[in-house]
Amino acid sequence: MRFPTFGPTLYGLVLLMVVLGVATPFLPIIVKVQLINFLLFVGLAYALNFITGLTGYVSFGHAIFMGIGAYALGGGIDRLGFPPLLGVVLGAGLGAAFAVGIGLVTLRFRGVYFAITTLVLFLAAKNIVPEISQLGGGVGIFMNLGFQPLAEFYTIWTIVVLEIGLTYWVTHGRLGYGLRAIKSDEDAAKTVGVNASRLKLTVFGISGMFAGATGAVYAWTLSAVLPDTGFDITYSLRMLAMIIIGGAGTLLGPFLGAIIVYVPYNYFQTVQSLLGLQLAVIGALVLLIALFIPTGIVGTIRRHVPILRRYIE
Amino acid sequence: MADLGLVVADLVVGLMLGCVFAVIAHGLNVIWGVTKVVNVAHGEFIMLGAYGAYYLNVYLGFNPVLSVPVDAAIGIGVGFLFYFGLLHRELRGKEAITRESEMVTLVATFGLSLVISNAALAIFKGDAVGIRWTPETLALGPFDVALGGLYVAISSVAIIAISDLFLSRTYLGNAIRAYSQDIGAAQLMGINPARIAAIATAIGFALTMAGGALLTVWLPVGITPLIGATYAPISFVIVVLGGPGKMWGSLLGGLTLGILIDVLPAFGISASIAMAAAFLVLIPVLLFAREGILR
Amino acid sequence: MTARLVARDVRKDFGGVQALRGVSLSVDEGSVVGLIGPNGSGKTTLLNLLAGAEKPTSGTIELNGRRTDGLPVNRVVGLGIAKTYQIPRPFLAMTVRENVAVAAMYGAFHRKAGEARDDAGRLLSLVGMDRQAETVATELTVQHRKQLELARAIATGARILLLDEVFAGLSGDELARSINLVSKIQKELGFGVLVVEHVMRAVLTLSGHVVVIEEGRTIAEGAPQEVVHDPAVVEAYLGTEVARAPT
């Protein structure tokens, strides 16, 4: 029997996650909370990577799935008496379902039109959901969950590990070939037999599933679902920034991007007047990277430092 | 049964608002139609135009209509900056914009929008401001028409008419139209593509900022650095409705959205849902009439 | 069972323009059919219809008796019909081997990733591109891109290949080598080919049967030498090109 060999990047990431998983119970509360928030960012980055990174379809409104996941958790706990974990599973399921439904319509549109449509759908959801009284109306849903840092941590930890594994599997197998062909030239891909619609829908669904799960965990940490935090455009923006900076479509990119985006976020949290600055800095990074090194940090390293190509992906 | 008077009043408001929407969308339309580039930071330039009008009002007592030429002039400068800073690298020497270029400009302008809106937040602060300008309301039979809105609407239509005349009657205008249809052919006729794209971009920004100035009438207490997030999507929807590159399409799209946003509430639909409906109109149009409603 | 692609009385209108006005032809696995005609005669349109890129306005297209008109492109490829682009469209972000491997994975062969990479290597040797196997497609010359285009179409496992002006721009030794290559591969792998061409030498050398269309209609068909001397054909081409083609 052949033991499959995995790339160094995967080993590195898995090792990192194992270390985090083992060490966290022993870390101070403050660090635990920061790690949870950091992993939320990572979770979002990998989620968007499945669609925008692998196919090149830019989704500006991806936070819609976060909101769906958050409300799934809120509704599940408040109306159906679910335990939080089940709420997260519900968030994942609804995220996937909505993604497939939305994707059936929107993935027919190319490039710019797809991007605008996702934004429009997000804004529509943001306007409509507060009008639904069963979901808490304009006020939102408040859950009495208490502080459960370890449960929250291991939930998001599991989500991220699954994402890393699935990203590796997709990029290394048949699906990865088909997606790269679509990203290069969708019409030509069809002429070699790639069912572009099905492949796009598949990764869009996966992307919605993970974004929904992450959104649910986010609501769990707040013990509340508010229309403003559920559908928060800044998360859409951060998701996109993370994978652009790190390297769209790569295995390491989303993680790296998450670190780069999270650190200023965490630091500037304490200084209110500098909150906007954090986004301005990220915006400047995105602008520069898009103009000069569009494949992001990981992509650029791979292109210009061939020796490292075997180790970093 | 809705009160007919209310519906008509809202319809008039919607139409006036729609005219201003048309101008802010027109800026996007010109750039999109000519360079095929979609400026995600479009909303931020509307916001800058609004702040321009605000400060002109506070320090020089200008009303929004008077601010238009000033904002337009600033817009032209900004447009050239934008072109040579950003677009020139992507468009130079290319016959048509490639898919990769499209993604690059989408992402780059996205980054730009983050920078501008948050820099503005730091400079102008988040408190909402508004222009002090209250011309009387005109009583037309049973209806009251806010004159401010009317002046601005008339200005908007005038601006669009002028830009249409420019594009169809002047040499430069026709050169721009030729370029937007076929860069290669335009070049063969002696048109310098970089010059044309730069000028078109400048015009687009002039329109955008002028539109931002006119918009202030409808934001008596609501100008903030983040209004771009509302008016950019509105502009995108309008351009798609009317058809990218179709000049009068901006007006058609603008009026449609203006009516949706203002008239639906008269029938008991909440303002938020009306807004959502206005946005969602995009989807049937993309599914069934990709080139926009105007043929 | 050998594959047979049949177009029956196919018409195609684009708005007011009638590109095809009732053309019929068939291509069998193992044979080479040439399709020639002046510019604008509808050759590329017909190829697009056969490949599934467009739907005929009327008429049918069948593969082994089963209707393929109206099916999406990727389904048609899955059934065994593949077309090359006149101006090659390789997957620029991928290497030559990967380009061919994708086709092997998603085409009629439907190979697994590992096998597909091996198949790709073998096919590249056959086509004479093994030295470029790990080159990224953006760095290829035009000629290599054309060869890649051909290899990719073959890799799908198609039993009927539709080649759109693969010999365009070639002359002299290069042309002779290309013609020999295509002939050799076709005989070795046994698929059927419909060759759309302007380069007469290639068509006459490779084809067993030639169809001539002009303004959307068939004006002549038969063995290459017969067709070449058919007065209607000579007239359609104004005589110069056809008369000069070496036998």
Image (cartoon, rainbow, N blue to C red):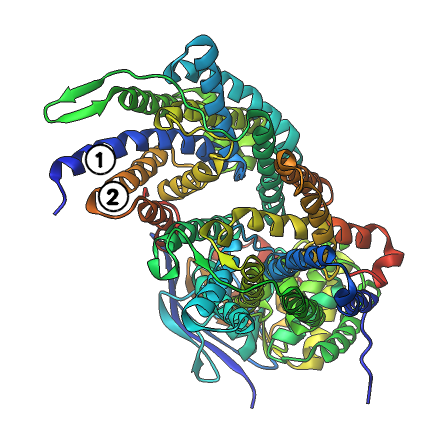
Measured from the top left, where is residue C225 in percent x and y?
58, 70
Seen in the picture, residue C146 relative to B264 is either above or below; the reply is: below
Seen in the picture, residue B132 relative to A175 is either above or below; the reply is: above
Q: Mark 1 = which residue?
A: B10
Q: Are marks 1 and 2 in contact (CB under 8 Å)?
A: yes
The foreground one among B145 and A157 is A157
Q: Which is nearer the N-term, disc 1 or disc 2?
A: 1
Which numbered disc covers residue B265? 2
- Quick check: do tags 1 and 2 share a chain? yes
Measured from the top left, where is residue A133 in percent x and y?
34, 58
In the picture, measured across the screen, residue B31 lies left or right of residue B211, that is right
Seen in the picture, residue C39 relative to B140 is either above or below; the reply is: below
Q: What residue appears at the point 70 percent right and 55 percent down from the top-left corner? A: A34
Seen in the picture, residue A159 relative to C241 is either above or below; the reply is: below
Chain letter behind tag 2 = B
Q: Quadrant of the C terminus of chain B?
A: top left
Measured from the top left, where is residue B37 in percent x and y?
54, 39
Q: What residue appears at the point 48 percent right and 84 percent down from the top-left corner? A: C64
Q: How many marks?
A: 2
Q: Residue furthest right?
A: A307
In the picture, measured across the screen, residue B2 lies left or right of residue A35, that is left
What residue type is disc 2 on? Answer: Pro
What residue type is disc 1 on? Answer: Asp
Q: What residue appears at the point 47 percent right and 36 percent down from the top-left corner? A: B33
Mark 1, Cα crowd under 10 Å, few <14 / some 14-19 / many 20+, is: many
Q: Secondary structure at mark 1?
A: helix
Q: What residue appears at the point 38 percent right and 23 percent down from the top-left corner? A: B214
The foreground one among B264 and C116 is B264
| Residue C92 appearing in the image | no
Chain letter behind tag 1 = B
